[in-house]
Image (cartoon, grey):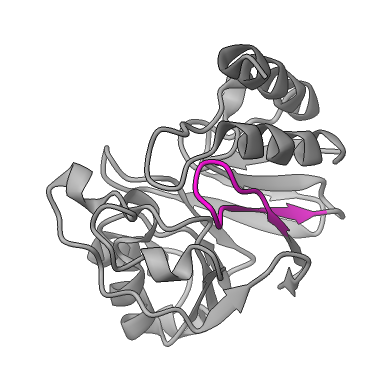
Amino acid sequence: MNPEYSGVYMQVTKLEGSFDDANAYLVDGTILVDVGMDGELIISELRKYIRPDDLETIILTHCHYDHSGGAGVVAEATGARIAIHKDDAPLLQNARASASELFGMKAPRVVPDILLKGGELLGGLLVIHTPGHTPGGICLYDAGSKSLFSGDTVFQDGSFGRTDLYGGNASKLIESIKKLTQLDVSVMYPGHGDIVIKDASEQIRMSLLMASQYSGI
């Protein structure tokens, strides 16, 4: 589908990254949700849609390198502030905890400006703490457009985040997915894969069922 999607009250553009990168989303021209590993590539992508200094905030859904590796480069080039949950902030610069070692890379030098707890509003996006994939994983929800940025908590077709990496916890992931089933979601922007524009809430409920069966909880 076209990388641009207009929800009610919100404009979202899925930026092109390298094959291994997580999805990066430009929201209303001022917020970047996740960055991927190649900051220079994302800066080039941003220039197609905005002036770099229009970017105000980089929100990282969690600490893993494929989502956060380029954040320092993008922040330096744009002046944007980096936000991440307080429980994942200390993991960013650890090669094992950030999973950078899985990509054969050193942990990124990413210093966040904003430490989140959950419950905040950033540019109209509600921060929901969803631990399980990592201790400080978050999702972002916009009630007006019924849009969910689900990070690596849930994906399309009932998929869900792995819990076998540092700080992963299956029971916490299931509780986090339960939170998401309480939302009215029309469009889901996952951390990997395609944007979900049909039966998003039903696919989240499927993720809960599949995660519960997989873990035996």
Magenta-highlighted residues: 128-142
x then y, percent, for residue 212: 67, 19
Image coords of residue 173 (percent x, y): 62, 37
Q: How far from the left and from the top, in percent, is residue 7?
A: 75, 48
Q: Quadrant of the C terminus?
A: top right
Question: In the shown orientation, is residue 165 left or right of residue 160?
Answer: left
Foreground residue among 79 and 108: 108
Percent position of residue 148, x then y: 70, 46
Compared with residue 174, is residue 21 higher up or lower down, i.e. above or below? below
Q: Nearer the viewer, residue 98 or 12?
A: 98
Residue drawn at the location 33% of the way across and 74% of the way down: 110
Residue 131 belongs to magenta span:
yes
Eyeballing the image, is 77 above or below 132?
Answer: below
- Camera-nearest residue between 166 and 153: 166
Residue at (32, 54) in percent of width and height: 65
Closest to the observer, 211 or 52: 211
Question: Could you tell me which residue is drawn at 30 percent across and 61 percent down?
Answer: 69
